[in-house]
Amino acid sequence: MKQSLQLKLGTQLTMTPQLQQAIRLLQLSTLDLQQEIQSALDSNPLLESDFEDHAGESHQDQNTPATPEGQEREASERESASEAQSDSSADGDWSTEIPDDLPVDTRWDDIYTSGSYSGGEGEDYALEQRNAASESLQDHLLWQLNLTGLTDSDKLIGEALIDAIAPNGFLDADLDEMAAAFEVETDEVLAVLKTIQQLEPVGCGARDLRESLLLQLRQLPETTPWMAQALVVVGQHLDLLGKRDFRQLSRRTRLNETQLGEVMRLIQTLTPYPGEAFGSEEPQYVVPDVIVSRKQHRWVVELNPETTPKLRINDAYASMIKRADNSSENNYLRDNLQEARWFLKSLQSRHETLLKVASCIVEKQQGFFELGPEAMKPMVLANIAETIGMHESTISRVTTQKYMLTPRGVFELKYFFSSHVSTDSGEDASSTAIRALIRKLIDGEQPRKPLSDNKITQELDSQGIKVARRTVAKYRESMGIPSSSERKRLV
């Protein structure tokens, strides 16, 4: 096999580091972008924030007297401050020295007043409270278990039972297997479980829904109206209650419709899953990227100023760069200057693209802002890409994890994109608008006679929107709305 050299001509698309950085910043969420900006400020000395610069100038102006009179005034202020500090020390508000010997019956409050420490009322305390980890269900139950009078061996069994409680509050363990593991009788494990079931929240440690509801009912005062009937319904006819078969339930319990309604009201006050009050997931806060408001009879789109920090190049370091100098220090400053310029340009490109896409969305979906979700028009990524002259992949990156604050709430930009359904008038209806119509019909239905999927299909057909029954069922399930049999209720 003979080796040879050949020349070929061709075109190839390559992404420069600047383009890669611009694309990466474009698809970052607001929180990720803030972290990226902070990382750039920490690593690049040529980048600085306008806020820090203004703060430094203000601080410098305050610390630099301009005239001799200003120096004398500053000296008098310092003298007054020192006198005030000595007066407050003489009054005994705070002592910097701890006495060596204290009387036996002396308390801390006798030496140091309560006003000397304000850690529980300031912003730092509030910040600690916000950032503190929430108490889990297991921690809450273990704290109460340690207050009971159980023996050490029973507490070990109790800890194992609490550890086996699922996040919804139900026990996910077999008592016989746990008894064999601790080499005790099953009755002893059951006795410890009964103790745990009396702890707060009531109903935790139950093995099924029926037991959880019964535990909560038995904790109510004996004078609670309709409690005896509720115990019968939950204990013996919970399956009929789940099927919403009120006719059969009334026949079995010998309660008329009014009485059964009172029992249902009492049962609805209970918590099916008592452990859900101790959710382990922290709430996720959404920061809008753009703000839409009504000004002078037109919708105006603006970038959120809190998510667009003002950065600039440090003039002091930039002035130290010399063109003909090839030293390591000069090359370091020159490279960081170029990176800072690229970063600022990528940020500016991100803001312009985001504002352009959001403005186009608002222009095409003005019916939503005027009338609500029912007036949403069908729209896909290609519509926006064609209007502003960008690729669909770019629009997809811009609309992912980007949020818009509107008078109707906060929505992700992807919320405004939906498929279309044909109507009798020849126009297309948005799937989002159809979902809004379905929800409106269900919200206005009679609780005793809820609308079936077939009936909703007929109602939409009367409005000129032709959709199949299975499509209505799919949209209803996507909104988390149960079926008509599950929505039927007496109260």
Image (spheres, rainbow, N blue to C red):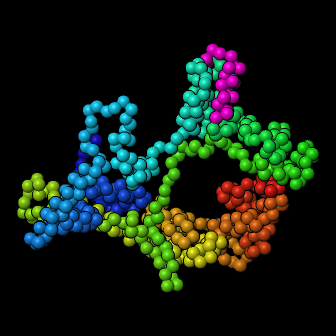
Instruction: Residue at 19%, 66% (x, y): give it.
Output: 62
Q: Nearer the viewer, residue 361 or 251?
A: 251
Q: Nearer the viewer, residue 408 or 149?
A: 149
- Image quadrant holding the N terminus, namely top left
Instruction: Write down the region rendered in magenta.
Output: 181-199
Looking at the image, residue 367 sits to the left or right of residue 402; the answer is right
Instruction: Residue at 80%, 43% (x, y): give it.
Output: 223
Q: Nearer the viewer, residue 111 or 122?
A: 111
Magenta span: chief secondary structure: helix
- For the image shown, how many numbered marks are present on the structure? 0
- Please provide percent x and percent y for residue 33: 38, 58
Up the image or down, 476 lies above or below 464; here it is: above
Instruction: Residue at 58%, 23% (x, y): give it.
Output: 155
Residue sitting at the far top: 183
Q: Magenta includes 197?
A: yes
- Please provide percent x and percent y for residue 489: 81, 55
- Please provide percent x and percent y for residue 421: 67, 69
- Image quadrant holding the C terminus, namely bottom right
